[in-house]
Image (tube, grey):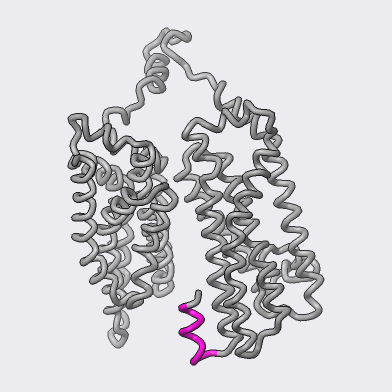
Amino acid sequence: MWIVAMSTLDQFGGHELFRSGMALAFVACLLEGVRRAGSSIAEEKSEGSFGLLLLTKLTGSELIFGKFLVTLLCSLQGALAIAPILALSILLGGVLGSDVFYSIIALVHALSIAIATGILISSHSIRSMAAMVATFIALAVGSVFFAFLLSGSFIWRINPLIYLNPLFPLQFDLRTDQVLGFWCAIVSSQSITFFALRRRGKSLAADWRREQEGHRPTPSDGAHDVGSAMRANRYLAPWWFKQPPIEWLTLREMGMHRGRWAVLLWCCVTAFLMWIAREGGLVIAIFAVFVVALWLCVASSRTIALLRQWNLFELLLTSPMGSADLIRGHLAGLRRVFLWPCIVLVGTTAALLTNLARQSPNTDYFFGFYLLAGFVTLLFSAPWIGMWFGMKAKTPSRAAILTVLAVVFVPRLAYGYLGDAVYFAVAFPIARAAVNREFLKLRG
């Protein structure tokens, strides 16, 4: 944020700095909800410690609101850190002190909704990876939907229904006659959030007991025919146990033993929308590439970071499985999930760019092909960068954040989109050598 502020002082006024600062701070609040709240309860379920909390005197509501308040307090300092940069826009003119005051309250409001959304989704999931991805998708789709309703001339635009929109407090130009609507939107949105958390807290313990007491059939439970025995044995001996253990673990942490076909279906639908949208399909392609890159970064680092957190690296390396088998199994798990979806996206984008270039000979689409080449090099480099940070970071969340920063955001700070292909071509051998060096240290 400070870099953005310093780069815009000479070219823009305080109003432009205020708008760019608010936009970046809003995105940071959403990502904070994904990072801190997305796996808050699901991670405890996967580790087996969630049931111990329910054995105490804590009720489900106390557990939910305790998670919410602790996560909000830990994240609040990040939202308040933007205040000095937004206050700098007052000195440049065009922004009042009241605008900065209302913007800080609006950011805290957005942060609380993002954290509540993450906790609600996490309480329904048993895989922290799946919970974080679902939280990210829910916040992204919700933000686009409510922003669309806020900007369009629809029935939702009519007062006072507009004040029920949770994004209404985040408007850049808040007029004096809209102050009452500002507080009404905050109170209504926070009230809905409170009742949603309270309702989920009441059913949390009962849902957990129902999950633990759920009956799975066995061959001795009346399985007298071959079909019933096969259906029962499907629970006792999952088919994926035949896979290498690291590949199985990678797929399990992503929740993709069977869900990878849904990912392929999503990419096929996205590719179809890209093709029928023609030039607008390039915007859809950029969004799809961003989602795939973000997900690949988290998946690449999380499994390795979990192995390090559980102190299983030394145990695995003492087995007949060597470091090459660990790396090969992890890459095989990632390949099972991302290979065909990425082939569909890259092939459709290349075909779309070629078709547009033939229809519009006067338009240069070289930049689009260069970006596509950068995405291809990203697909080869991101798994190694994720493994590198997974072995260096202390927690899976920190490993995922560092990988996203190194793969998605650091190239933007250097040369924008122009340096992607060169950046990842250089990062690939460096990360690969670093991963092999870390395994040699563990064997050491």
Extreme residue in the front direction = 444
Identify which residue, 20 or 393, lies in the foreground: 393
Instruction: State which quadrant residue 415 falls in.
Output: bottom left
Where are the magenta residues, as a range?
Answer: 3-12
Classify 193 as above or below 418.
Answer: above
Task: Say above or below: 56 vs 116.
Answer: above
Magenta segment, principal secondary structure? helix
Count of numbered tags: 0
373 or 362: nearer the eye?
A: 373
Question: Which residue is at a point 28% across and 62% down the rendered structure image?
Answer: 378
Left or right: 146 as drawn, with respect to 411? right
Residue 176 relative to residue 102: left or right: right
Could one spot residue 74 in this view of the protein? yes
Measuring from the top left, give residue 150's x and y in whole percent.
67, 70
Image spot of residue 267 (x, y percent): 38, 55
Whether residue 269 is visible, yes or no, is no
Residue 89 covered by magenta stretch:
no
Residue at the spot 50% in from the left edge and 37% down from the top edge: 126
- Among the 4 quarters of the image, the one containing residue 185: bottom right
Q: Nearer the viewer, residue 412 or 148?
A: 412
Q: Position of residue 42 (x, y in %)?
A: 52, 40
Image side of residue 33 versus residue 334, left or right? right
The residue under the point 32% across, 66% down is 349
Residue pictured at 49% horizontal, 19% vertical: 216
Q: Is residue 7 above or below residue 44?
A: below
Does 251 sit above or below residue 104? Answer: above
Residue 374 occupies which quadrant of the picture? bottom left
From the viewer's perspective, is 168 left or right of 400?
right
Which quarter of the figure is the C terminus placed in?
top left
